[in-house]
Amino acid sequence: MPRHQSTAAQRARQAQRKTGGKYTVELRQTQAGSRPGPFTLGQLLTACGTAPDWTGENPVVTPEWAPEMFDFAPLGGPVPYSAVLLLLGLLTPTSRSTELELESRNGFHSLIVACSGRRFELVLSQDDYVTERCRVPGCELSPVSAHSIPYCALRHLAARSQDELVEMATGWGNAQREEFSAQNPAAVPLGEEGDQLIAAAVAQCALFPVQAALIASAYERPDMVDVVYFGEQAVQVQHAMDTEYFRLMRVAAATRTRIQKLAGGRCACGAALQIGAGPKVPPQFCSAVCATAAGR
């Protein structure tokens, strides 16, 4: 038995010998039955700097490709030094007392660690792969934007509340304005991320506040354009805002049509779905009465 092999790994090896099962399966089952509790960033940093190299056999990659690892029980076993250092960088600035917790571990393939609502995947079969995941526990998808829109577009962004969507829209617009407005304040792109926020807003009947938050944060409040900008530049910024307004309206219309097609063109009550049912009626319902009856 390798000297620095983790307790979970040892139990998995023992189970493998008894049952003849695959080592990675046994390790996953062993860890699932005894998931470690929270730990601090300081404990992880100390272990990364002082723990001896893990010298066990990596069952996923050959020795020449295996990353250098150290054993850290709160993360369920061996982890690559470089991945931990990347994680520490992504969590900056945070204090040593910040708590993290292992959400799940898939043998020597990968693990998910959670910290202050954020979730990170560490790949254990290579040196330097750490990526942020959607903030909903159990979701394996990437967020639209790790910093501004921390939910996946496919499953969870459209489930956020109006207030959350407005906050994310403001954050995304501000980030884009900070990055692009210095050269030309009329050329701030809202990009696919902005479109995904609008699509989620349509599903939540929050189109107008989310659209307004996006445009105001990326460019300027409509009543302040002539105060902040002058002459030709004010005209250009106002034109960009108007153009983006109508573009986002087209995105919203396409989203509404797509949702209605997925619903088969009919409400749950059997009535045909209409485009103009109202701004507070979800696209898959024919009226506010049906939406309320369905708990929306």
Image: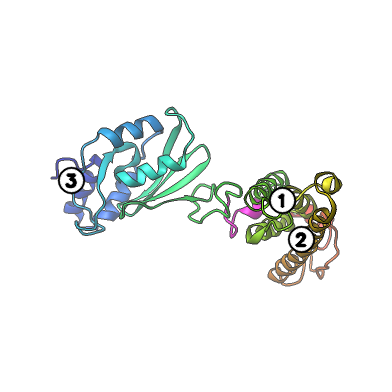
Q: Please state, as top left, top right, bottom left or bottom right, where the N terminus lies in the image.
A: top left
Magenta region, residue range: 151-159
Residue at (23% x, 41% y) in the render: 6
Q: Which residue is mark 1?
A: 218
Residue 71 in the image, given as x and y percentages of width and height: 26, 40
Q: Residue at x 35, y 30 (%)?
A: 43
Q: Quadrant of residue 3?
A: top left
Pointer 2: residues within 10 angstroms few (<14), some, or many (20+)? some
Mark 3 in CB contact with mark 1 (< 8 angstroms)? no
**134 left or right, relative to 175:** left
Residue 134 vs residue 147, the one in the foreground: 147
Q: Amino acid at mark 2?
A: Glu
Q: Residue beneath label 3, please?
A: 55
Q: Is residue 102 on the magenta stretch?
A: no
7 horizontally vs 182: left or right: left
Q: Amino acid at mark 3?
A: Thr
The secondary structure type at the circle numbered 1 is helix
Residue drawn where x is 35% and y is 34% of the image = 45
Q: Report whether 103 appears left or right of 182.
A: left
Which callout, 2 or 3, points at the residue further toward the start of the chain?
3
Q: Amino acid at mark 1?
A: Ala
Quadrant in the picture for residue 254: bottom right
Tell me the CA gap for discs 1 and 2: 10 Å
Mark 2 vs mark 3: in front: 2
Q: Magenta segment, principal secondary structure?
A: loop
